[in-house]
Amino acid sequence: MVFPNIRNLREDNDKKQIELANYLNVKQTTYSKYELGKINIPIEIFIKLADYYDVSVDYLLGRTKEKK
């Protein structure tokens, strides 16, 4: 499943995939597969991304347009 807000937030914050991969302690290729929806994103990763961008997990999932 693809979650476009994850990629959009990264690009809006001028971050590279490798930066987020390092923060999440995963390989860049793994992070790329998260963005492309090729592999499932563990809940722990969603939580870390929500904390990193200061948004809700629901926003990352596309369940709301409200960031908080």
Image: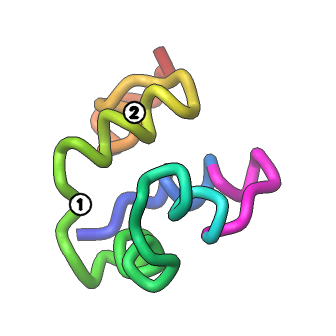
* Residue 36 placement: quadrant: bottom left
Q: Residues within 10 Å of mark 1 (few under 14, many from 20)?
A: some
Locate the N terminus by quadrant.
Answer: bottom left
Q: Is residue 40 rendered to the left or right of residue 30? A: left
Q: Position of residue 35 (x, y in %)?
A: 43, 70
- Nearest the eye: 7 or 47: 47
What kind of residue is marked 1?
Answer: Ile
What kind of residue is marked 2?
Answer: Tyr
Q: Which region shows up in magenta?
A: 10-17
- The residue labelled by disc 1 is 41
Extreme residue toward the right, this view: 14
Q: Position of residue 53 (x, y in %)?
A: 57, 32
Asked if residue 11 lies in the magenta stretch, the reply is: yes
- The residue labelled by disc 2 is 59
Q: Position of residue 42 (x, y in %)?
A: 18, 54
Q: Residues within 10 Å of mark 2 (few under 14, many from 20)?
A: some
Tell me which residue sits at (40%, 67%) in the image.
Answer: 26
Asked if residue 65 lies in the magenta stretch, the reply is: no
- Nearest the eye: 58 or 30: 30
Do residues under tags 2 and 1 come within 8 Å of each other at their CB atoms?
no
